[in-house]
Amino acid sequence: MNKQLTYFTLIVLCSSLNPAYAMMPRLGEMPDRRTDSNCWKWAEEQVKSDDEIPIMWGRRDDGSSETAIAVRPLADYCTGKSIPDIVGFGSSVGFDRDYCQRHPTHKVCIKRR
């Protein structure tokens, strides 16, 4: 019993030493047929399903987010296009740092300094 308590205490201590990082919200299953129409509908459903999705996918260069903006990159992602660099800003300290190294003149990076 004492050995188990020691291991538990060690695990809790190690966990508390790491900073908490936000993560990208999970997206729902994409449509089987990834047409523009199906993907647009899927994207609209995503922004309604989780409050974090419009924040991450609707991010502007100044750091603000808007639900209406989030639908386009989600629909594009569904159809196979690449994700804009700013999608995910705020999801982790490492992501933000790397993004701002690549885009130092974006308003969100200037504000972050």
Image: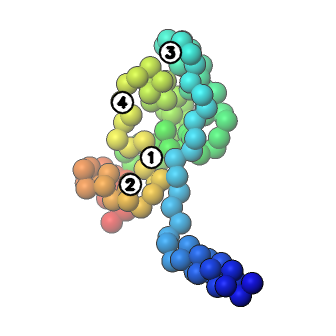
Q: Residue 62: x and y, percent? A: 39, 48
- Whole-Å distance between the Cαs marked 3 and 1? 23 Å
Q: What element carries label 4?
A: loop
Q: Do the residues labelled 2 and 1 touch (CB within 8 Å)?
A: yes
Identify which residue, 109 or 45, lies in the foreground.
45
Q: Number of callouts in the render?
A: 4
List the residue tagged with mark 1: 88
Q: Distance between the residues labelled 4 and 2?
A: 17 Å
Give the amino acid type for the residue marked by disc 4 in the picture: Ser
> Considering only order in the chain, which callout, 2 or 4, is on the residue closer to the N terminus?
4
- Against 48, residue 19 (above or below) is below
Q: Which colour scheme is used?
A: rainbow
Q: Do the residues labelled 4 and 3 touch (CB within 8 Å)?
A: no
Left or right placement of residue 72 versus residue 82 in this view: right
For the C terminus, the image quarter is bottom left
Q: How crowded is mark 4: few (under 14 residues within 10 Å), some or many (20 or more)?
A: few
The quarter of the image holding the N terminus is bottom right
Identify the disc placed on residue 95: 2
Q: Which residue was labeled with disc 3?
A: 34
Q: Of discs 3 and 1, which sits in the foreground?
A: 3
Dot 3 or dot 1: first in sequence order is 3
Mark-to-mark CA distance, 4 and 3: 15 Å
Q: Residue 82 carries which label?
A: 4
Q: Earlier in the sequence, mark 4 or mark 1?
A: 4
What residue is rendered at 64% in x and 27% in y? 45
- Which quadrant holds residue 26? top right
